[in-house]
Image (spheres, rainbow, N blue to C red):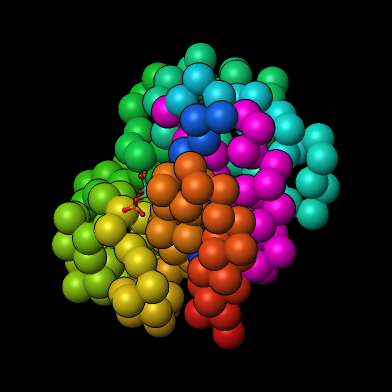
Amino acid sequence: MQETLVPVLEQAGVVPVIVIDNVSDALPLAQALVEGGLNVLEVTLRTEAALAAVEEIAKHLPDAHVGTGTVLNAGDIRRSVDAGATFMVSPGATDALLDAAADVSVPMLPGAANPSDVMRLLERGYGYQKFFPAEAAGGVPMLKSIGGPLGQVKFCPTGGIGPKNAMDYLNLSNVVCVGGSWMAAPKLVAEKNWAEITRLAKEASQLKG
Ligand code: 3PG
């Protein structure tokens, strides 16, 4: 069920977590990120413009893998699929969400914050999980500890990650990629500072080597 997502995450390194207020910003922002070497993009469903932004990116930027984030329920899943998302990310997981995810072919990266969360998702077949909120939930030491008994699970930690600590996560054997909003910060988007976004994306894309 996550087969198509695994290679995407493996090559991603860093996944920009994007909040879009204006649909007109979607393409230039996505282009700036792709130009910087980041082509796996998570557009959070936190704004009115989010789904239209996903549609725009999916339609016009075939080099990008665009997915939805902040997917909280069955309705978000349906809307993500309809908009053309190629993956979905949720900050946590509920039975209703996972049941709905099992009915669609677009893969899901569900969120876990502790060993019990991780085990429950593993029971449902999720070998790849988002670790959220990464820094607040124990950060690198927590992930290292989870990797002992649950070493078969790979994570994409997100939440509080930036250029200063991204490498500490990427160096862990159970981390496949990291997510973060720093290279697409709302202020940079509001200023339409695409050049700076590309520069930060380039820096981020080089982290994984
Ligand atoms: C989020 O859902 O907002 C992401 O986890 C991004 O977190 P960040 O803004 O701390 O990178």
Q: Residue at x 68, y 47 (%)?
A: 28
Give the position of the C terminus as an image quadrant.
bottom right
Residue 126 image offset from top left, x and y in percent = 47, 47
Residue closest to the far bottom: 209
Quarter of the view holding residue 59:
top right
Whether residue 128 is visible here, answered yes or no, is: no
Q: Residue at x 55, y 24 (%)?
A: 49
Q: Nearer the viewer, residue 71 or 52?
A: 52
Q: Nearer the viewer, residue 51 or 149?
A: 51
Q: Is residue 30 magenta?
A: yes
Q: Nearer the viewer, residue 148 or 87?
A: 87
Residue 103 image offset from top left, x and y in percent = 60, 23
Whether residue 138 is visible here, answered yes or no, is: yes
Residue closest to the far top: 75
Q: Residue at x 27, y 67 (%)?
A: 143
Judge from the rendering whether residue 159 lies leftward or rightward of residue 114; answer left or right. right
Q: Is residue 177 magenta?
A: no
Q: Residue at x 42, y 45 (%)?
A: 186
Quarter of the view holding residue 36:
bottom right
Residue 14 image offset from top left, x and y in percent = 52, 65
Q: Nearer the viewer, residue 143 or 79?
A: 79
Q: For the magenta stretch, what is the residue range?
A: 23-46
Q: Is residue 111 above or below residue 184?
A: above
Residue 130 image offset from top left, x and y in percent = 40, 51
